[in-house]
Each structure stands twice: as C-alpha cells, then as structure tokens.
Image (cartoon, rainbow, N blue to C red):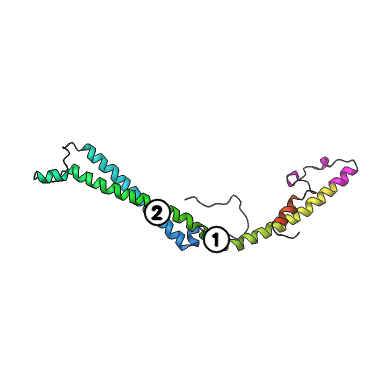
Amino acid sequence: MLKKSSLFQSEATPFQVPSLASCDDVYAGLLAKRGELNEGLRMLIASERQLEKDIAADTTPDVRPGVAALLGDGPTAKSANRQKLAAVRADKADHETASRAIEQRIRDAKTPAVRKAIALVRPEWDRRQKVLCEALAVVERAHRDLAMLADDVEAEDIGSSHFGQRPHFLGDARDGHISRFLKESGYAV
C-alpha cells in the first residue's frame, strides 16, 4: 500500500481523504476477499512447489494406486504425492479463476465507491478551492496594478527592468490566465 502524503504543508485544517474501502462496505468486502484469495493462492503455489520437489526427489518406482492395490501393495508415497499435487493444482486453478472474477467485481464496485468518496471530500475540496480563488483574485488585482505601473514606467522611457524581477510566470496581465481560471472554477471576480 502506498502511503498518502502531501507535497505541501499548509495551515489548513487537517483533512484525511478516506479510502474507497472506508467509503463503501461492498468495495471493502471485495478487497478483503481478494486478499484471502491471494493468500490462499500463495499457499497453494508453495504447496505445489514442495510436492513437485518431493516427487522429483522420490526414486521409488512409479506405480499407479490401482496397480498397487491389485498387487496387494499399499500406495507409494510418490503416488500419494501425485494425487495431492493433482488436488492442489485443481484448487489453484479454482483460486485463479476466483481471483479473476473478484478483480472484475472490484472494477464494477469502484465507481459507486468513488462516488461515495467524492460526496465525502467535496465540501473540503470546495472550501479549499474557494480559499485559493480568493487569494488568486487578490493576486490578479496586484498583478494588473503592477503591470499598469510597469506600462507607465515604460511610457516615461525609464525601463521597468531597473526595478527587479517581474512575475512573468503569471503571464501577461492582459491575457487573463488567473481570471480565466477563476471563471472556470465558478468564482466570480
């Protein structure tokens, strides 16, 4: 699992984004079932490998259980291991089929879980978006004021470059990057 972290530290009220599993019990149950299936499959693969090693290491003659019974002999360890291996492989195939099915169910359950998570996060998102837009509106006004002053300085042939850095990363004050973002966000300027 990846640890959730933020690149930015803010003074905003701490808010924990909920996991999809905590938002939707069906989704959580499917994830738990996937974990169980994966653990079972891991154990079956380990068992399969061990049985294959045991069979390869057994040097006794290979006699089918039916032939051994006709001869009055008991089943050999090798034949018993082969039967166990066949059962393990069948169980492993069932686990693999179930794993594919559970993955599809998880994909199908994700959309409702995301909708529930969005409903829980939306108020905090909207609150922070509003704070950002209010701050950007102040920046937009200051950017335009500085641009007007720079234009006046240039008009008097003084050269605005003498006054230090200008916020070129904001773009031209007349092209409206910030105001366009504010409009797209639904924030009235």
Instruction: Tell me the number on the disc at residue 135.
Output: none
Task: Look at the magenta stretch and give its main secondary structure.
Answer: helix
- Do the residues bearing badges 1 and 2 touch, measured as CB atoms within 8 Å? no
Asked whether 74 or 127 is in front, the reply is: 74
Q: Residue at x 15, y 45 (%)?
A: 66
Identify the secondary structure beneath mark 2.
helix
Please provide percent x and percent y for residue 100: 41, 51
| Nearest-to-viewer mark from 1 and 2 | 1
- In the rendered view, would you say 25 is above or below 136? below
Q: Residue furthest top?
A: 59
Q: Which residue is mark 2?
A: 35
> What's under tag 1, amino acid-wise?
Arg
Q: Which residue is mark 1?
A: 115
Q: Residue furthest left?
A: 72
Q: Would residue 11 appear left or right of 172 to someone viewing this image?
A: left
Residue 180 covered by magenta stretch: no
Identify the secondary structure beneath mark 1.
helix
